[in-house]
Amino acid sequence: MIVHRKEKAVSKYTLEVRYRLRAHDCKEFERILDREVIPLAAELGLTLGGVWKSVTGKVGEYVEHWEFNSLEEFENDWNKLINDSRLQEVFKTTGPMVEDETFTLLAPFLED
């Protein structure tokens, strides 16, 4: 998978998105994420820190980390992505594949 990143200072906030897919949906979902969602997010200026999937334990668990420098940037950029009509179209396909989705905005505990 190609990870598109824009150059930024060290992020202050990380949005962790966790979800689960049924095993038979994983390959198609990964294709859509890699070819459609990640490039769209990069086009809109979002920074994807990475995407991970389970290799032991429960099959089909995924974690995405999105990076933001401020709460304002998070609110603006995340809403820009979520409300984009192209992503809304993608959701028509991927929405039924995703289960147990959670969003957690993390702030640094220790700073330099």
Image (cartoon, grey):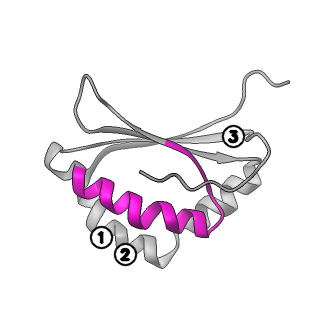
Query: Which badge, 3 or 2, is on the more N-terminal residue?
Result: 3
Q: Three-letter amino acid code at disc 1?
A: Lys
Q: Main secondary structure of the magenta part?
A: helix
Give the CA separation, mark 3 to mark 1.
29 Å
Q: Earlier in the sequence, mark 3 or mark 1?
A: 3
Report the span colored magenta: 27-50
Specify the quadrant that holds the C terminus: top right
The residue drawn where x is 77% and y is 21% is 110
Answer left or right for 47 relative to 56: right
User: What residue is shown at x 50% (from left), y 65% (from top)?
Assistant: 39
- Image marks 3 and 2: residues in contact by CB distance under 8 Å: no
Identified by mark 2, the residue type is Glu
Query: Can you give x and y, in whole percent of width and height, for residue 92 in the image?
Result: 30, 70
Mark 1 and mark 2: Cα distance apart in space:
5 Å
Query: Which quadrant of the structure image shows residue 34?
Result: bottom left
Vertical placement of residue 62 versus 109, above or below: below
Q: Is residue 84 magenta?
A: no
The structure residue drawn at horizontal position 18% and vertical position 45%, both measured from the top left corner, is: 22
The x and y percentages for residue 10 are: 76, 39
Give the residue number, with chain letter if any, for mark 2: 89
Q: Residue extending furthest front?
A: 2
Q: Quadrant of residue 56?
A: top left
Label 2 secondary element:
helix
Please tell me how crowded label 2 is: few (under 14), some (14-19), or many (20+) other residues with Cα within 10 Å. few
- At a point 38% along the width and 58% down the height, the residue shown is 33
Three-letter code for the amino acid on which mark 3 is drawn: Tyr
Q: Which mark is residue 92?
A: 1
Mark 3 touching mark 1, by CB under 8 A? Answer: no
Helix, strand or loop status at disc 3: strand
Q: Which mark is residue 13?
A: 3
**Structural distance between the alpha carbons of marks 3 and 2:** 28 Å
